[in-house]
Image (cartoon, rainbow, N blue to C red):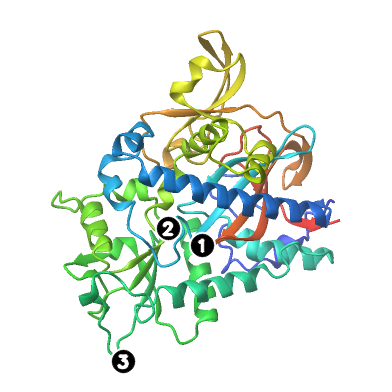
């Protein structure tokens, strides 16, 4: 569906809510002018697949947590992060807010390619902008009740992390007087527009869901920790912190004096001085070779139930550890760095015998702006030949591929979202495309 470039749903978007309609350095605006429609049953399927895969991933995460440290090191997990991946958390889930990403193969079948379990963005587009477009075109929004789901979930998070309700092992820090507040702090680096917008979006949703709550924003530039935890400007301390900052980077950060800030921060967390949203163990699922672990457990034939195996076979893109590569069949494989983000350093390789030739490399425009940890290892996935779509953006009509996302609020599947990339492997050049119901 094409819209007149002079006037479109994009003009209806509140840039106070979605502050990155225009991205510096890009000729086109971030939202596409066209929309993408699927039947209602398609959205049911993506939510069902996400819900089932989430249960499967939680089951595999326990295997990781129970394995010796050497196993984690073989998956390129930062050694100094491993001691913090075993503390229980109030929701009892390895990640509280996550996003599954799928592509459509050339038969139109959904194939899950990644999970962002640590610091998922794309929330504003899915929970807000998609609805603006649906109203503009007078179509049914597949996310019709999703914002209410988000508010209910954040209320659950707020109440579930309350120290009055959440009994911790370190009892001396569980003594609270009736007039003591429990500040729920939302934090990110405020000068990174997408992170700031996403953090504010969640903060406002929690404020709306919990009017009585003490909810505040704190820029990570202004964060101070002391022996009691995260110090706030009024002399109090944060009871909970939502952090939009990758755990694999946080762990190695230092103070101006060279002290291990990340480790000191997580020591306080391990002492139950505050809760983290997402918890540190979200990094287990974020680690790209975690999908290789899930697939290896599937191949053993003994770990997953028959219904779980059916879901893996149908939706999970076959994924392999770096050490598996010599034993794989000849063919095309995607090679991903364990800690890569935004499509950085992704290659498609052609395997012939023991040789791997470069078939295609992902070129990222703003390579140096993408903050990510250097990876010591890679993982491999079967290369999925994708179905092609055409969409209209400010500069005209382009052909490319879709990445379809489904957010998980705890273990509940929620909003869906869509990005369109003129390239086979989506990166920072991808456009937001509103999803509608046929």
Q: Nearer the viewer, residue 38 or 160?
A: 160
Q: Secondary structure at mark 2?
A: loop
Q: In the rendered structure, are the residues bearing label 2 and label 1 in contact, judged by CB atoms less than 8 Å apart?
A: yes
The residue where tag 1 is placed is 198
Asked if residue 280 can be seen in this view, the reply is yes
**Residue 237, picture quadrant:** bottom left
Q: Position of residue 210 (x, y in %)?
A: 50, 82
User: Which residue is pictured at 57% across the width and 42% down the height?
Assistant: 304
Query: What crowding class fits label 1: few (fewer than 14 Cα within 10 Å), some (14-19), or many (20 or more)?
Result: many
Between discs 2 and 1, the one toward the N terminus: 1
Badge nearest the viewer, 3 or 2: 3
Q: Distance between the Cα atoms at labels 3 and 1? A: 31 Å
Q: Position of residue 301 (x, y in %)?
A: 57, 33
230 with respect to 411 (left or right) = left
Q: Distance between the Cα atoms at labels 2 and 1? A: 8 Å
34 with respect to 244 (left or right) = right
The residue where tag 3 is placed is 179
The disc placed on residue 244 is 2
Q: Nearer the viewer, residue 35 or 101?
A: 101
Q: Residue furthest bottom?
A: 179
Q: Is residue 369 above or below residue 384?
A: below
Q: Distance between the Cα atoms at labels 3 and 2? A: 29 Å
């Amino acid at each position: 569906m094409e819209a007149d470039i002079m006037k479109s749903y994009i003009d209806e978007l509140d840039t106070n809510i979605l502050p990155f309609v225009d991205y510096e350095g890009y000729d086109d605006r971030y939202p596409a002018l066209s929309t993408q429609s699927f039947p209602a049953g398609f959205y049911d399927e993506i939510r069902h697949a996400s819900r089932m895969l989430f249960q499967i991933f939680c089951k595999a995460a326990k295997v990781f947590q129970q394995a010796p440290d050497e196993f984690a090191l073989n998956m390129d997990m930062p050694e100094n992060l491993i001691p913090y991946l075993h503390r229980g958390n109030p929701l009892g889930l390895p990640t509280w807010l996550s996003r599954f990403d799928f592509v459509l193969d050339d038969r139109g079948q959904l194939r899950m390619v990644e999970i962002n379990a640590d610091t998922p963005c794309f929330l504003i587009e899915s929970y807000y902008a998609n609805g603006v477009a649906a109203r503009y075109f007078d179509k049914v929004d597949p996310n019709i009740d999703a914002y209410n789901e988000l508010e209910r979930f954040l209320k659950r998070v707020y109440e579930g992390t309350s120290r009055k309700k959440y009994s911790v092992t370190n009892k001396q820090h569980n003594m609270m007087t009736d007039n003591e507040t429990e500040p729920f702090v939302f934090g990110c680096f405020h000068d990174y527009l997408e992170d700031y917008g996403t953090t504010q979006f969640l903060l406002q949703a929690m404020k709306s869901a919990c009017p009585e709550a003490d909810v505040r924003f704190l820029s990570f530039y202004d964060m101070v920790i002391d022996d009691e935890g995260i110090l706030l400007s009024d002399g109090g301390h944060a009871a909970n912190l939502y952090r939009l900052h990758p755990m694999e980077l946080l762990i190695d950060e230092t103070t101006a004096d060279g002290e291990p800030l990340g480790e000191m921060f997580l020591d306080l967390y391990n002492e139950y001085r505050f809760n983290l949203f997402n918890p540190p163990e979200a990094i287990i699922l974020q680690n790209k070779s975690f999908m290789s672990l899930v697939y290896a457990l599937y191949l053993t034939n003994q770990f997953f139930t028959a219904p779980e195996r059916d879901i893996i076979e149908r939706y999970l893109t076959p994924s392999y550890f770096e050490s598996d590569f010599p034993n794989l069949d000849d063919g095309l494989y995607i090679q991903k760095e364990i800690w890569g983000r935004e499509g950085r350093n992704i290659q498609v390789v052609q395997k012939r015998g023991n040789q791997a030739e470069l078939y295609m490399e992902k070129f990222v425009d703003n390579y140096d702006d993408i903050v990510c940890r250097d990876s010591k290892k890679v993982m491999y996935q079967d290369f999925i030949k994708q179905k092609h779509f055409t969409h209209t953006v400010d500069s005209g009509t382009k052909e490319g591929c879709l990445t379809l996302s489904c957010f998980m609020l705890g273990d509940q599947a929620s909003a869906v979202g869509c990005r369109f990339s003129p390239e086979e492997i989506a990166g920072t050049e991808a456009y937001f495309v509103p999803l509608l119901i046929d």
